[in-house]
Amino acid sequence: MSSKAGTVEPGPVRRFEGHKDVISSIATFPDGKRIATGSYDKTIRIWRLEDGKEVVKWVVDKAVGGIAVLRNGKHVVSAEGDVTFASSANWQLWVRDAATRIVVAGPLYGHTNTVGHLEISPDGGILASPSSDYKVILWDTNTWKMHGDPLLCGAPANSVQFSPSGCIAVATNKGIQIWDLSQREHHRIAQFKGHNDAIHGSLAWTHDGARLLSAGNNNDPVIRSWDASTWRQVGDPLIGHDDNEDIMRIVLNPAGTLLASASTDLTILWKLSTGAEVARYEHKDSALHVAFSVDGCSLFSGGLDKTISQWDIPEDVLAAARGDTLDGELKAEGPSRGKQKNKNGPLDVCSSWSRSRQFNFLMLLVGNSRPGP
């Protein structure tokens, strides 16, 4: 459970304005001086953090879903396609040079439905693209060819996270899956139901790979922690988002000590070692994406308000988190808020599943469109 509600922080220190539709994704450059953003307005933009100026703008043919910046900082990868319930087929990946602005690879074919998230492996050699077409494709970032066969998940794949040990976790509409990538033929080594509702939207690994964190939708708007050796729940869930709200994205800071969760009500910052809320950030509209700055001192969020907001993290929060580690179970501090369900462990993996209309719409915006290949 969470501590008492964290302090509501003042408004953003900067707003990056220019997109004309939903902000679907935010990615930071390794140099810490720029961010890249994607939108359903069919543009990808690069912004300079020093003054908030837009320095690159690509106008593309389709809506932009997930984006990623490669670890060399030179290339921006984007997933592009249609985003309506009637048409969401033939999504493609594109790779563009941030300096010359030219296309260096693409279109990369393989997906037949929405791709709302892209993730790069710790060594930078693989990019993963989960999709509503029930599969995750792994791409070699040197050749931009598929790295082995796709991971066939049996349900829409909403997001992925690489572990430090070489596995990859996949959040799907029917639960969480763990795949071993160490062998030439990838195979699924675990599958479990993490939240009361079947849709699992976002994941994050602790830096030591010992815990996997997962976020639930409006039927279970909490964050749960899973022991990577047993896949049983560790400690109490983090409760802070209001009932009937959807947690759209969770992400750890570069030090692995603070966790940010973006939701349809607000963004919450958590101290990971205690599970305590340490700050709250209120938006004009639902936040669909959140990212930390490279130095860990700021947050960037965006969503339905068509604007990217930069928020300062309070200095006392940063000071308290320095040197922190995830030591055993997440500890509870004080009264909880929101709903609390299934504290004792994973749900039956064979349980039935359903989706609320609101979450279905919001997940369409960030990549999980109609539930079919």
Image (spheres, rainbow, N blue to C red):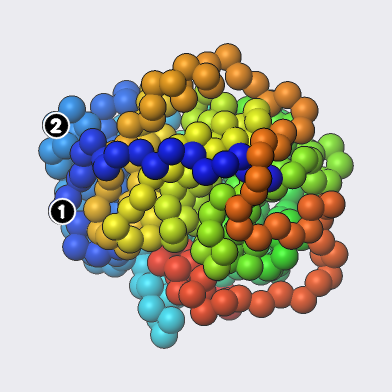
Q: Is residue 57 above or below residue 3?
A: below
Q: Is residue 100 above or below residue 107?
A: above
Q: In the visual, does 193 lie left or right of 259?
A: right
Q: Which mark is residue 286?
A: none
Assess disc 2: are there few (<14), some (14-19) or many (≥20) residues with their C-alpha within 10 Å of its C-alpha. few
Q: In the visual, does 41 lie left or right of 53?
A: right
Q: Is residue 85 above or below residue 343?
A: below
Mark 1, secondary structure of its residue:
loop
Residue at far bottom of view: 86
Quadrant that contains the N terminus: top right
Question: Residue 75, can we see it?
Answer: no
Residue underneath mark 2: 51
Q: In the depicted view, which residue is nearer to us: 338 or 213?
A: 338
Residue at far top of view: 323
Q: Residue at x 81, y 72 (%)?
A: 351
Q: Position of residue 326 (x, y in %)?
A: 68, 26
For residue 311, what is the image quadrant?
A: top left
Give the mark nearest the N terminus, 1 or 2. Answer: 1
Quadrant that contains the C terminus: bottom right
Q: In the depicted view, which residue is nearer to us: 78 or 346?
A: 346
Mark-to-mark CA distance, 1 and 2: 14 Å
Question: Residue 253, can we see it?
Answer: yes
Assess disc 1: are there few (<14), some (14-19) or many (≥20) residues with their C-alpha within 10 Å of its C-alpha. few
Q: Position of residue 339 (x, y in %)?
A: 65, 60
Q: In the visual, does 135 lie left or right of 263?
A: right
Mark 2, secondary structure of its residue:
loop
Query: Which amino acid, mark 2?
Result: Asp
Residue underneath mark 1: 18
Q: Is residue 16 above or below residue 108?
A: above
